[in-house]
Image (tube, rainbow, N blue to C red):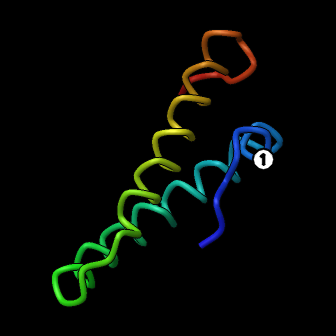
Amino acid sequence: MAVLKNKDIENMSKEDREKKLKELELELIKSKVAATKTGSSKIKEIKKIIARIHTLNKSFIKKGKLKTK
């Protein structure tokens, strides 16, 4: 799992961000299950990346760069 920086997320297209968001949400679920067995700190990192993507999507909507559905 690579750390996604704001600059990387901004350079992604809308479809890529949505795809990455779905992948991260699935990975978060898997990490939660694995954490009950092993005690992983990966969950916090995944949540931060998901929050970054949501935040940038909202800022794009406010700036008018991204159209809502």
Outermost residue, right side: 11
Q: Of residues 31 and 63, which is closer to you in this image?
A: 31
The residue lying toward the viewer, choosing from 18 and 44, is 44
The percent position of residue 21, horizontal first and vertical second, equals 52, 54
Q: Position of residue 48 (x, y in %)?
A: 46, 47
- Residue corresponding to mark 1: 8
Left or right of 12, for residue 38: left
Residue at image point 59% right, 73% down: 1
Name the residue at 51% across, 66% down: 23
Q: Residue furthest left?
A: 36
Q: Is residue 1 left or right of residue 33?
A: right
Between 19 and 37, the one lying in front of the other is: 37
Q: Is residue 33 above or below residue 16?
A: below
38, 12: nearer the viewer: 38
Query: What is the quadrant of residue 40 in the picture?
Result: bottom left
- The type of residue carrying mark 1 is Asp
Question: From the viewer's perspective, is residue 32 above or below residue 67?
Answer: below
Say left or right for 64 vs 18: right
Residue density around tag 1, few if under 14, some if 14–19, many if 20 or more, within 10 Å: few
